[in-house]
Amino acid sequence: MKRGMSITSSFGGCLISSIVCLVGCDVEGTKAPTATTQQPASNTTAKSLDDSAPQQLPTKEKSGVTRETWGKADGQEVFLYTLTNKHGLEAKITNWGATVTELRVPDKDGKPDDIVLGFKTLDGYLKGDGKSSNPAYFGGIIGRYCNRIGNASFKLEGKEHSLAANNGKNHLHGGKKGWDKLVWKSEPAKAADGAAVRFTLTSPDGDEGYPGKVDAAVTYVLTDDNALRIEYEATTDKPTPLSLTNHSYFNLSGESSGSILDHEVELKSDRYAAFGDGGVPTGELKSVEGSPLDFRKATKVGQRIDQLKGEPGGYDHNYVLRDKKSDKPQPAASVYDPKSGRTLDIDTTEVGVQFYTGNYLDGSLASKSGTKYQQHAALCLEPQFFPDSPNKPDFPSPILKPGDTYRQVTVYRFGARKHVR
Ligand code: BGC
C-alpha cells in the first residue's frame, strides 16, 4: 500500500474506516513500504522486579502509522495518529498537545487494554472540566517548563521575567495555554526500529512570559521491542528555561480499572527535592532513607501512602536521578501490576522524575469508558529538570542558550509477566 492511500484496517478487533495508511501498514496481503527494520520477535526486555521470567508478547501485526482527522481546534485541523508494532501494541497520539490518548498493551494472557487515562474525543480534551481544557494534562507534552516555577517569576541575566500564576501564586506546566494545549504540526517519521510520528512547534518570543523564540520537535517511536520512545529537541534565539515532559497517567490494569495503589514501584533514586508551600522546592535535596518516599526497592504504592502529610494526599515528589543529564537514557523507574502482570520500565536522560499519584483526580472527569476518574486512578512518572530550577542556582541548570540544542530521550518499555504473587 502506498503512503496516503485510503484503507479500511482492523486492529485489536475493531474496524476503523477512512483511515489513511502513512507508513508500513500491511493490509490484505499487500506489502507496504516500511520505515521499520524487521527484527526477530524478541522476549520482552522489561526488567523484572522479582525473579519471575518476563513473558513474550504475542506477535500480531506489522508496525505502521495511520492517520485520521479528529476535529478542529484554534481553527486548525487536528489529527489522530495510530502507531502499531508487530507485537500488537498500539499508541494513539494527536497533534493537539502532541498528546498520547490511548496506549494498548497486552497483559499476561495476551489481552490488550488501554493503560493511559484520557478522553474519548477531541471535544473531551477541549472542554475538559468546563473551565480549562484537559485540566489534568492527560498524556500531553508539557512546555516550556513542566512542574512549578515559584512566584511565577525568575531572573535571567539580570532581568526579571513574569509568568502566568496558574497554580496559586506559582506557575505550573507552562502556563495558561502551555504546549499541551496547542495544535502542533505533525508528520509520520522514519525510525529504524518502529513506527514513528514527529510533532513540531514554534513558541514565539514572550510566549506565556518566557523569553526567546523556541523551535521544538517531539518524535514518538513505538518500537518493535515494545517501547514507546519519546525524543525531544529544541533550540532558542535567546536564553530561556526549558524542561519538557510527557504527562501520561498510567494504570497498568486498564484506564478505568480503579486505583493504582496495588502497583509496585521502584525508583532509581535516593534523594528527592524537599518542598514547602505550594509544592515549590526549598532547594534542599533530602535522603529518602527511613521515609515513605523510599522506593529503592519495589514497593506497593498504597503501602505507606497514608503516612504522607499534606493535601490532597499521595505522592507528588520530584526524585533525583543524577547530577547532570546523561547522553543516553538510563534506568529511572519500574512499575509492576500484579493484577494484569504488566510491567513498565522507564529510562531517561533527565536529572529528575516527578512521581505523581493522581492526587487531584476527584471524580469530576469522565473516563474513556464512561466511569469517573477518582483519586489514585493512575500514576505519572514525568522525567524533567527539578521544579523551580530557574530560581535555584544549585540545581542543574535548565537554561537553553542560543546555539545549543535541548535534547531528551525517554523510553517507556512495556512487558507482561505470567507469574502473579
Ligand atoms: C504535578 C501535580 C499537578 C499535576 C497536574 C503533576 O505533574 O506534580 O502537582 O497537580 O501534574 O495534573
Image (cartoon, rainbow, N blue to C red):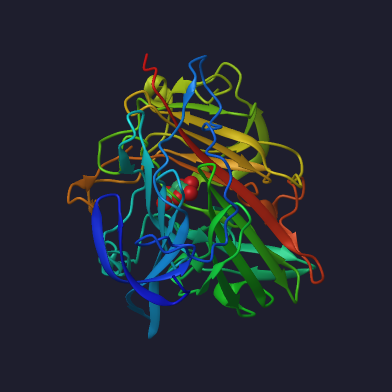
Vertical order, 363 against 160 (above or below): above
Q: Position of residue 347 (x, y in %)?
A: 61, 40
Depth check: give the residue in front, 306 or 228.
228
Q: Position of residue 314 (x, y in %)?
A: 40, 34
Quarter of the figure with residue 268:
top right
Q: Residue furthest left?
A: 370
Quarter of the figure with residue 323:
top right
Left or right side of 406 for 57? left
Q: Position of residue 163 (x, y in %)?
A: 56, 68
Q: Residue furthest front?
A: 29
Depth check: give the residue in front, 121 or 103.
103
Does residue 148 appear anywhere in the picture? yes
Residue drawn at point x = 54 percent, y = 62 percent: 34
Does residue 137 appear anywhere in the picture? no
Quadrant housing the N terminus: bottom left
Left or right side of 28 for 165? right
Q: Position of residue 413 (x, y in %)?
A: 53, 39
Residue drawn at point x = 48 percent, y = 65 percent: 32
Residue drawn at point x = 54 percent, y = 53 percent: 147
Residue drawn at point x = 37 percent, y = 54 percent: 136
Q: Residue furthest right?
A: 403
Left or right side of 359 for 63? right
Quadrant housing the C terminus: top left
Vertical order, 296 against 401 (above or below): above
Please state the total of marks drawn on the protein image.
0
Vertical order, 275 against 406 (above or below): above
